[in-house]
Image: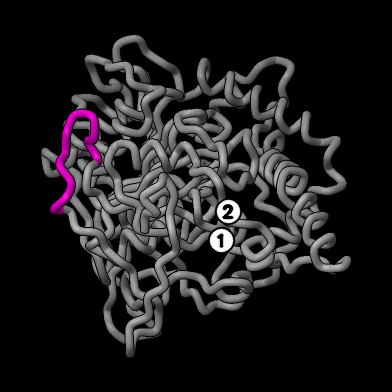
Amino acid sequence: MSDEAGGYLSLPAVTENVMAKSVAVPSRLYSTITPERPLAGLRLGVKDIYHVKGIKTSGGNRAYFYLYEAQNATAPAVQRLIDQGAILVGKMGTVQFANGDSPTADWVDLHCPFNPRADGYQDPSGSSTGPGAGIGAYDWLDIAVGSDTGGSMRGPTGAQGIYGNRPSTGAVSMEDVIPLTPTLDTAGAFARSASLWSTVAHAWYLDFSEEHPAYPRQIYFSAAGSGWGASNDSSAMELLDRFVRNLESFLNVNGTQVDVTQRWDSTHPTDAPSNVTEMLHDTYGVLTSVDQYNLLGRPLFADYEVAHHGRSPYINPGPLVQWQWGIPRNESYEFALHNMTVFRSWWETQGYGRNDSETCSKGIFVYPWSLGTPNYRDTYLDPPTQPPLGFANWAIAGYAAGGELVVPVGEVPYQSRITHQTEYLPVSVSLLVAHGCDLVLANLVRDLEMNGILKASATGRRI
């Protein structure tokens, strides 16, 4: 709750016969939407890597929470939403320090939030786990803020069947936020409808406010990696194909099937490797592991040891392994950054992220994100040994700095081994545009919803 002095206070509240703390939900009666406050009355949840004045930040780690005092400033990304009328309800769970972990064994310090969809025991994805699951679960929560470095917004968006994005790099300040790597970290928003998400994007991403008179005139849909043909579920593929056909009809264009690796092979810079998958294999791992250990891990260990007579803090298996992997790779950092820069330049000139004066983004790169495949949270997996490595569609937006939004296009049935009943999981598609074209994408999905091509998601078991 507000402390009426620009900061916030934790409000402890426990209700009898409820297995969790209660949440104080503010009334909308005292909020009036105006041009200056377009988000007035919207209830906002925030991933617990963003600092909020007066409140401690945990980053999903108990040692960090108890070691450091309450914050004396609110992250500009969060403050921008508050200034435009959004009402902060509270902090929400995150994979430790915004890394990518599995719920069964990797979430040790704090419990993984529950995915409300289907049988209730599906992996909610991460790292923006709490905000994504919360938007899928609570009709009293309107929007939620997460972050995306390598899929941390897009993963929960697909798992919960809602709307969520990774914006163009630099669209919103990442100051006063626990970092993974400043080269790739971005701030995204979750919502249950395209229209509401569009409203938030227009209010938030003020750096990219230029209006363009037309929508992109090309659709590129991926034919490789996690692209078309990756699922054996014909019903999921039917939903994907129907969405693309409707998108083609709405834009009055014919989509083109593309293969990024083949395109690179035939058009890459002469001084760059011919195999883009090999060139970028270690890039994400090096950038995130080296940066987070140097910016967060090293000082955390030092501060904790001083405060606790030489003892070390507990770190969950995922981030700990990644930091240990990154420690000897400091010298590889500049090489990884160079490879990313080479790819970004190619994507903007020879790839599928070219800008256009009339449409902002010459085309839209489209690929499936979630295919309604069960992913149970109680599955035992091998322990982590390294950070995410390799190259696929999920990595392109970060390396290319483009704006990407995941949207739900339907749901498909499966037979749950938990409930022994037919349950339904979301199918979603990712839309990637050129750098700085986030608001064109926001306008497009708003209009797609107005024309019945996209639909708002409900809360609970089914979208």
Q: What is the C-alpha distance between the residues marked 2 and 1?
A: 5 Å
Within the image, what quadrant is residue 214 found in?
top left
Within the image, what quadrant is residue 406 found in?
top left
The kind of secondary structure element at disc 2 is helix
Q: Which residues are magenta?
A: 29-39
Q: Which residue is drawn at the image coordinates 50% and 33% (left, top)? A: 173
Q: Badge 1 is on which residue?
A: 95
Q: Position of residue 185 (x, y in %)?
A: 56, 39
Name the side, left or right, on which 192 lies relative to 67: left
Q: Looking at the rendering, in which quadrant would you find the N terminus?
A: bottom left
Q: Which residue is drawn at the image coordinates 35% and 52% (left, top)? A: 88
Which amino acid does the dot numbered 1 rest on?
A: Val
Q: Badge 2 is on which residue?
A: 98
Q: Mark 2 near mark 1, Cβ–Cβ under 8 Å?
A: yes
Answer yes or no: is residue 56 visible: yes
Q: Which residue is drawn at the image coordinates 71% and 22% (left, top)? A: 272
* Residue 426 vs residue 117, the one in the foreground: 117
